[in-house]
Amino acid sequence: MFIATLLTDPATPALDQATVEAIRNAWGGGPARWLDHGVAAEFPLPSMPSNRWQVWEDLQTLKVDLVVQADAGRRKKLLLADMDSTMIRQECIDELADEAGVGEYVAGITARAMNGELNFESALRERVSLLKGLPESVIERVFENRIRYMPGGRELVQTMKASGARAALVSGGFTAFTARVAEGLGFDEHRANILHVTDGQLTGTVAEPILGREAKLAALEELCAGLGIGVDQAMAVGDGANDLGMLKRAGAGVALHAKPVVAAECEIRINHGDLTALLFVQGYARDQFVT
């Protein structure tokens, strides 16, 4: 049995009964269940529709996302999440670089790295080198003044934890930020890169080895082994090329507002919903969310 989930941005609900029923009828689905009226609905299917990606494409003009997956095992026991542009709206290194007066240049490198056009590790070293001489205090200033959580993050983490799952934040960014984000949203643990600081100033270097694509994949496998579960029982979410390893290996790999090259390789693509979309695709209704 399969489940089709239709959803949209809770801030601007755009899903109506007619759209849900039209697709359900076309695919011979069972009765629809509203998970959040105007925002998310699901219905069972006897088989995977052959035209699901064409329907997905058509729904993009309505700002509606579509996910079709096997019903069995869709509630996961591990959440592995990227941080930058996933759990938060910003890229921390771009914000630090802006403080150093090289924001536009660094943002260009970041975009190319996230599109998979550059080697992640080399691109990170280059960007970090441009932060040399910044006072360590800039990290706190950037976090307080520039960093904003992605909507739905706390509900995602707390709801999955309340159902017995573990949540880990695994970022190619920096521990100076993941520690704060993990605490703020309730993650059980966090992993990221360490910025070197000497005499209260950033040195322009980062600890080796750098946490990149392979390290994120290794973290997924290590955490699953520690919990005694298979990777099929994990959900991973991210937006950049350095997330692809874990996104393709996890039982549910979610490309959230991802770069096109990343979304193209993922079965779950969320372009319009917020982080609560990850709860809806697991079958949680709005009244089951924990905040």
Image (tube, grey):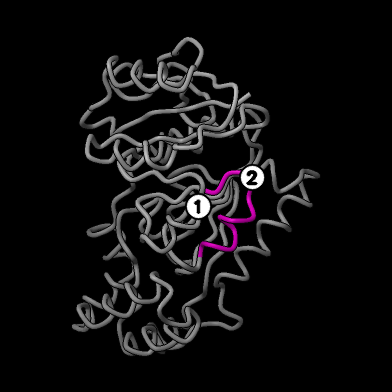
Asked whether 19 or 280 is in front, the reply is 19
Using the image, determine if residue 178 lies above or below residue 123: above
Using the image, determine if residue 35 lies above or below residue 74: above
Q: Secondary structure at mark 2?
A: loop
Percent coordinates x, y for residue 238 in the rendering: 46, 55
Residue type (three-letter) at the residue carrying disc 2:
Gly
**Residue 244 lies in the magenta-colored region:** yes
**Residue 137 is at least partly visible in this image:** no
The quadrant holding residue 152 is top left
User: Closer to the observer: label 2 or label 1?
Assistant: 1
What residue does disc 2 label? 251
State which quarter of the image contains the C terminus.
top left
Q: Which comes before the other along the chain, label 2 or label 1?
A: 2
Asked whether 17 or 110 is in front, the reply is 17
Question: What segment is highlighted magenta in the picture?
Answer: 243-253
Percent coordinates x, y for residue 60 in the rendering: 28, 41
Q: Secondary structure at mark 1?
A: loop
**Residue 164 is at least partly visible in this image:** yes
Name the mark on residue 133. Answer: none
